[in-house]
Image (cartoon, helix red, strand yellow):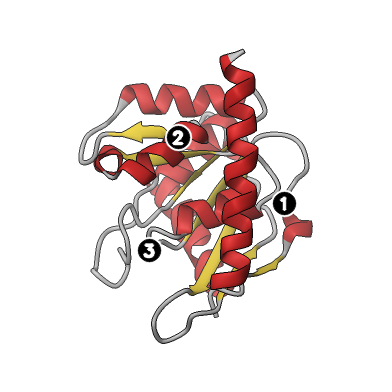
């Protein structure tokens, strides 16, 4: 019964957020034809603001679990969204085994997860090293990676646009544990994301 109530709440919240993005930010959604309708998917995009996770959640037309840093749960609204959409809390700056296991389990069940390779907002601009979590999950699970480019939603440009790119398949590397290969895959994913923001 609790799960059914949660599903109803999620449906209502998703609809309300979608309308909000459309009215307030005149949201434009491109590339939905690139999102696989079934099977495990890892959504990953550039990270600019707190708007990014809910924007992806309400526009992708696939349920997804976000990997969200624990600090976000201090914000009541973001904590509520995390509860409604089954976000996976992650401890920063350490290898969070619980979060890794939950993410892999979600993908194994044919579902979707979402995360930001930058690891923090505007990570590239801050000179942060891009995290290879997406590459790890893609290689370990065989799930396809859908890059997302987000632009706008700022004081300079109110209109927000999200573009979903063609899925990237790294299943041929399944079982590979080479750090250099992970870095190579991460770089390719980020290049695709950056192209989608142009």
Q: Residues within 10 Å of mark 1 (few under 14, many from 20)?
A: many
Of the image marks 2 and 1, the number of the one nearer the N terminus? 1
Secondary structure of the residue carrying numbered label 2:
loop
* Residue 146 in view: no
Q: Which mark is residue 125?
A: none
Relative to 45, say whether 149 is above or below: below
The residue located at (54%, 73%) in the rendering is 25
| Nearer to us in this view, 180 or 110 | 110
Does residue 17 appear left or right of residue 102 in this picture? right
Instruction: Tell which residue pokes out farthest to the bottom in this image.
Output: 156
Image coords of residue 102 (percent x, y): 45, 23
Q: Which residue is mark 1?
A: 35
Picture quadrant where residue 73 is located: top left
Q: Can you say which quadrant of the picture contains the N terminus?
A: top right
| Nearer to us in this view, 17 or 152 | 17
Image coords of residue 142 (percent x, y): 62, 34
Q: Which residue is mark 3?
A: 49
What is the distance, in whole Å, between disc 1 and disc 3 at their CAs? 23 Å
Image coords of residue 65 (percent x, y): 52, 36
Secondary structure of the residue carrying numbered label 1:
loop
Q: Which residue is mark 2?
A: 87
* Residue 113 in view: yes
Image coords of residue 2 (percent x, y): 56, 16
């Amino acid at each position: 019964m609790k799960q059914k109530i949660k599903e109803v709440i999620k449906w209502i919240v998703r609809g309300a957020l979608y309308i909000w993005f459309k009215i307030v930010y005149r949201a434009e959604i491109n590339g939905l034809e690139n999102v696989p309708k079934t099977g495990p998917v890892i959504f990953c995009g550039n990270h600019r603001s707190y708007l990014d996770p809910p924007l992806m959640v309400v526009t992708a037309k696939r349920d997804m679990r976000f990997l969200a840093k624990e600090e976000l749960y201090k914000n009541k609204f973001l904590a509520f969204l995390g509860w409604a959409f089954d976000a996976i809390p992650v401890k920063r700056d350490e290898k969070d085994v619980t979060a890794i296991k939950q993410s892999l389990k979600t993908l194994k069940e044919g579902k979707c997860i979402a995360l930001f390779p930058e690891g923090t907002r505007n990570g590239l601009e801050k000179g942060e090293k891009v995290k290879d979590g997406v590459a790890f999950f893609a290689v370990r699970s065989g799930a396809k990676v859908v890059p997302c480019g987000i632009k706008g939603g700022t004081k300079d440009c109110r209109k927000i646009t999200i573009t979903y790119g063609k899925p990237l398949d790294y299943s041929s590397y399944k079982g590979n544990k080479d750090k250099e290969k992970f870095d190579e895959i991460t770089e390719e994913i980020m290049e695709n994301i950056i192209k989608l923001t142009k």
